Amino acid sequence: MTHVKTVLISGGAGFIGTRLARRLVGGHRVVLLDNLHPQVHKNGAWPTDSPAEAEQRFGDVTEADAWNSAIADYRPNIIVHLAAETGTGQSLTESHRHASVNVTGTARMLDALSHSGHRPEAIVLASSRAVYGEGQWKTVQGDLYYATSRGEQQLAEGKWEPIGPDGEEGQAVAHSAASVEPRPTNVYAATKLAQEHLLSSWCTSMNVPLRILRLQNVYGAGQALENSYTGVLTYFARQAMAGEPINVYEGGDIVRDFVHVDDVVSALSAALALPAEYGFGLVDIGSGSAGTLLEYATILAEVAGSPAPETSERFRLGDVRAAFADIAPARALLGYEPQVSFQDGVVGLLEWARQGAGVSGDPLHALVQSE
Ligand SMILES: NC(=O)c1ccc[n+]([C@@H]2O[C@H](COP(=O)([O-])OP(=O)(O)OC[C@H]3O[C@@H](n4cnc5c(N)ncnc54)[C@H](O)[C@@H]3O)[C@@H](O)[C@H]2O)c1
């Protein structure tokens, strides 16, 4: 088969990487670079649903040799950089590990490209909505402000909403890279922003087109349920499958934008196919709608046939109150149009989970640590 392009996906054995590889193998040579991180890959093996047509390359992105040899051997036309440490709560206690993989791992890639003289046609980065922190809000009068991080004392008093400059509660504004500044409030988020800065500095100097996609909460079949540090939805799924009422923090009204992995794969595929003349692109990727965690948990419980969710006054330090994306720029740049409804996505997630996805680990641990 004639391959149009060689696409190297770092973190290609992960949740998103595996699904992206499956989408691309029909028309591209696909190389997966991954160290099969034990927190994600409990059995230390490549995922069984990783496509056979893709070439699997074991390597750690923090090691120069892994990048040097991968770049020399494959001279990829496109690099999709997904390899990362992704534990939001965990990043506060394991900062060095997150900085090492996310920041040094990215810099290693750039050095390998510099030393080899190879210039890819484009680099695509999966960044995160986490870079916005609590994000931008507006007062009832419509004045915009940046919410400050909600401290432990505020949360312990059950005051969930960020307080505005006038002392009143405001209303969250959609994440939009063009108009909302990033203001990270956890180490994971800071490392994702550092990845953006490293790449945009290098790519501008080296004239390599860069596409950055800030993803909202991604979910779907294939997300490691056995990894205690992954998404809140996998934790909800585990509770529902155990026949327990889902416990929803902060009174249930945390706002999120859950985007299905198939839609994220469509966005990444469009980003890597974007013609070079588009240069730098930075967009937010979400589902196009937002809801409260209680609303999402209720749908999940209905689909699972588990008891109605319960809300609690519990909270996690470092969580933000509201996060959702303005996807108009992604529509314009990438022709992005989300296709999977939350209801359908949850049916798929639960089906997959019930087909024997390992449900191990300590759920309470996940409750404390994950998003
Ligand atoms: N899943 C989400 O909700 C979400 C949201 C926003 C952004 N993102 C970003 O998308 C990307 C992919 O996320 P995912 O959900 O597929 O995560 P994942 O944990 O399923 O996949 C990450 C992959 O990277 C690999 N990896 C980790 N450390 C590595 C290292 N040192 N060397 C080589 N490989 C390493 C892991 O083995 C894993 O296969 C990440 O960059 C993440 O920050 C994800």
Image (cartoon, grey):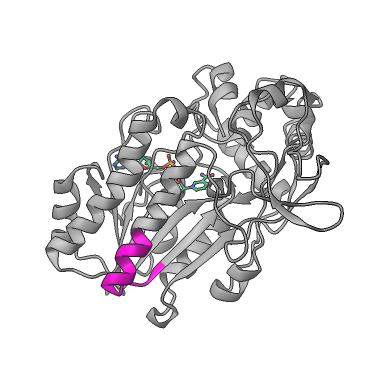
x and y percentages locating residue 275 in the rendered image: 41, 80
Q: Residue at x 57, y 56 (%)?
A: 181
Up/down of 294 relative to 65, above or below: above
x and y percentages locating residue 82 in the rendered image: 39, 50
Q: How many marks?
A: 0
Using the rendered view, name the quadrant where residue 336 is placed.
bottom right
Q: Residue at x 50, y 20 (%)?
A: 360
In this view, which residue lies farthest toward the bottom? 277
In this view, which residue lies farthest toward the right? 140
Image quarter of the N terminus: bottom left
Give the magenta-colored segment's residue range.
Answer: 199-210
Q: Is residue 146 left or right of residue 83?
A: right
Using the rendered view, name the quadrant where residue 200 is placed.
bottom left
Instruction: Tell which of 136 and 304 is nearer to you.
Output: 136
Residue 21 can be seen, yes or no: no
In this view, which residue lies farthest toward the front? 166
Image quarter of the C terminus: top right
Q: Residue at x 18, y 63 (%)?
A: 114
- The reply to whether the magenta stretch includes residue 78 is no
Q: Is residue 118 left or right of residue 243?
A: left
x and y percentages locating residue 335 in the rendered image: 58, 73
Up/down of 207 relative to 173, above or below: below
x and y percentages locating residue 338 in the rendered image: 64, 62
Residue 237 can be seen, yes or no: yes
